[in-house]
Amino acid sequence: MSTTDSSTAPLPVTVIGGYLGAGKTTLVNHLLRHAAGRRLAVLVNEFGDLPIDADLIEAEDDNLIAIAGGCVCCSYGNDLVLAMLDLTKMIPRPDHVLLEASGVALPGAIAATVGILPDYELAGVVVMADAETARQRAGDRYLGDTVRQQFAQADIIVLNRTDLVPPSEREAVRDWLISEYPAARQVSTERGQLPPEILLGFREAREAATGQPGPLHGDHHQLVSASAVPEGPVDAQAIADRLIAPDLGLLRAKGVVQDFRAGLMLVQIVGSRAEVTPAPPGSDVGMVCIASRDAAGDSELLASRLKQILAKFSLPVEAIQ
Amino acid sequence: MSFTIYSARKIITMNPNRPEATHVAVRDGRILGAGTLEELVGWGAHELDERFADKILMPGLVEGHSHTMEGTFWRYIYCGYFDRMDPDGHIWEGARSIEAVVERLQDAAAKLDGPDTPLAGWSLDAIYYGDRRVDRHDLDKVASDRPVGVLNASGHILNVNTRALELAGLLRTGINHPGIPLGSDGLPTGELKGPDAMTPVGIHVGFDRDLLACDESGLRQFARLCVRAGVTTAADLANLLPPDAVSMMLRVTGEADYPARIVSLRRLQNMTVPEIVDRALELRGMSTEKLRLGIIKVVSDGSIQGFSARLRWPGYYNGAPNGLWYVPPEQLREMFALALEKGVQVHTHTNGDEATELVMECLEEALRRHPAPDHRFTLQHCQLADAAQFRRMKALGMCVNLFPNHHFYWGDQHFAMTVGPERAERMNACATAVATGVPMAIHSDAPVTPLGPLFTAWCAVNRQTASGRTLGENERIDVDTALRAITLGAAYTLKLDGEIGSIETGKRADFAVLEDDPREIGAEKLKDVGVWGTVLGGRIFPAAGI
Ligand SMILES: [Zn+2]
């Protein structure tokens, strides 16, 4: 964040859940490598096996690991809340917090706790699923209900390690997740190689407002991105509600729109979670999004659907119905 | 060399070869022998000490599961429903109504200086006050300008006033958290459930950042409570044992007049399994006569009254969803296997019977890989185990430390709400454990319930609830069995039974000095046995002078 008020703005927190071996740590390390100047703080439940790749570590203290690029990793042991209260006092303050939940933790409970802490805002619940073992775990005698609750609490389910199963099995797991957990959007990957925007958001509000597609770092053939600029005043909440519908398969969207009632509003989507808040005065309108190719089709199709939605809600929703 | 022979009204030795004696001879802090005066004078020149001539001596009682933070808690205001003795020996009368709690806190608030000084209380048990919940308006009557908070007896709920909510930024609408109930005005009621909801407010009402930590003064207060309860050895069940805490504990317990032996377990947290096993071995090497280290504690599930324990089918009686796992089975397997391989003992907290089942399954696997004679891995609480599970414990060589105090304090709630009548009657199945041959201890989990093995024994013998119901007649045990559980039984789970737990030649001269004979006072009065004090390693600690 380059804005000067970043020290008072709420600190965004992405909760990363999922059972052991689903790839939470791999994803976290991938994000640290592609932080692109963001100062990430990683909170982990335990320093079990060190959750950070050795080459990223600059220094190690008892409860703190300093990571290249000004990022840090702290362990919160039994007391998540105290660790989070400490984190806001850190100078310089981090830009974004990745909270890696333990394998048996319920990410929804952690997300609720983020919601009661001053200075924080929840930026989504992402739950990793191991393509090889997800279904078996969900039926486990002891762990099944925990694993199922983890999936049910996700805004986005990341189906990971898809290279380890034959394509037919990959599709079967994907379809199973869609039918069991329709509330979550889904994205597939092999080694947690997701564009950082999905978890961390678009780098600058300006990026969204220019109407340019958000840059997708690396080769992400599973993903498509698109952008659009609304023609005039819209119903921001109605747009947000439409953007989280499953048929679009949106993983992340950010945009500034002119709401016909409330003025300039910031619309943020993380999977099935939508938030509409006032935008900084003077922001340019425009919207950018990333979706999974499975659900959204190609970029052109996504762009035209996005335009349609912006057009459809360019009048108050009551007026349309 | 001179030594001392103590005479007593009766000595209950817990040594089946000579269960009772009139005299015990002590030299260098250890027992030369127990028997008649004629037998003991054979050891040579001695001094006959008759100060205990009208007292009953028992082996020093062993509390197999407590937390030294009970000593720390007494710096907050006691708000419990039942009478409870503080480290000074002062008995705090139970607060029998919400109004009484408020009044007590008002008295305490009046003594504070500074209008913003926080006020903290503990051991509130709102379930005894009927349907009415304690809310922030009750505590606003204590103070509206200073933050006020009272911790629940279970340790899982914190009640606060409006000012405390305000300081934590929680006096607002739109809060959506399962641990924060809202009133009709859309604002939090002031009841905060679970650590995640409690902590952000708790720090404003004066609870230390880490409630589980015990500082030096807490450790000293804890030992004073031990003397008053006849306890000479107490297990401190879940400590992180950072180096500075260990040095403090070594220094304090090393003082000649520190009146208790402490067995402190290192909780599995913030370390990998190989690291904690190494650390346990290192800690074991630092052990002294009065501070024993080197056992690992693992917590596998939550609590039954908090609905966070893992239950097998059919789950909670009131339909609450199943509880929470605190460690994945993969970690349990790794923990047990490596600990068995390296000869480190592990005590595992299980409350629900599903947690018990998983722990036994993981241990069985680990034992197949690393057969280990006499491992004495112990299940702590293990409240819901059924008969088959006790048989499996026996087959696996496990010990169990049951929690009969629960019947008295929460038995009525377990019957009506958490697990229902049938399972409430089998909770803490002491008789089944004994009949099955599982080595058994019983405990208080102080500060959750008061430190007092004789009270715990009374609970196991009578299984009476606070309302007077006898909960599970068949699981009652007799007085002798209960007395064994609070001496040799608990010592066995700590692998100290060769050293403490009975009065016989060679053991440490650790005695509970009692005013009444627990065998004669009657089962229903066991909890009323008076405690004069203790003897620890031959050193005398009268409760009146502690
Ligand atoms: Zn405990």
Image (cartoon, rainbow, N blue to C red):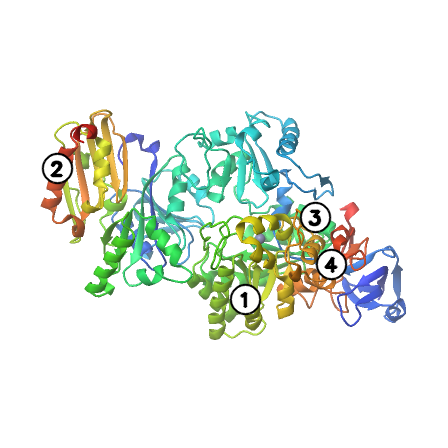
* Residue B375 percent across, percent down from the top left: 57, 70
Q: Nearer the viewer, mark 1 or mark 2?
A: 1
* Residue B189 percent across, percent down from the top left: 49, 33
Q: Nearer the viewer, mark 1 or mark 3?
A: 1
Between marks 3 and 4, how big is the CA–CA gap?
A: 14 Å
Residue corresponding to mark 4: B60
Between marks 3 and 2, how big is the CA–CA gap?
A: 73 Å
Q: Tell me which numbered mark, 1 or 3, is placed earlier along the sequence.
A: 3
Element type where label 2 sits in the image: helix
Residue corresponding to mark 3: B225
Residue corresponding to mark 2: A307
What residue appears at the point 16 percent right and 28 percent down from the top-left corner? A315
Element type where label 1 sits in the image: helix
For the residues bearing labels 4 and 1, Cβ distance under 8 angstroms: no
On whether disc 3 and disc 2 are found on a single subunit, the reply is: no
What residue appears at the point 46 percent right and 71 percent down from the top-left corner? B365
Q: Is residue A252 left or right of residue B338?
A: left
Mark number, residue B389: 1
Q: Quadrant of residue B50?
A: bottom right
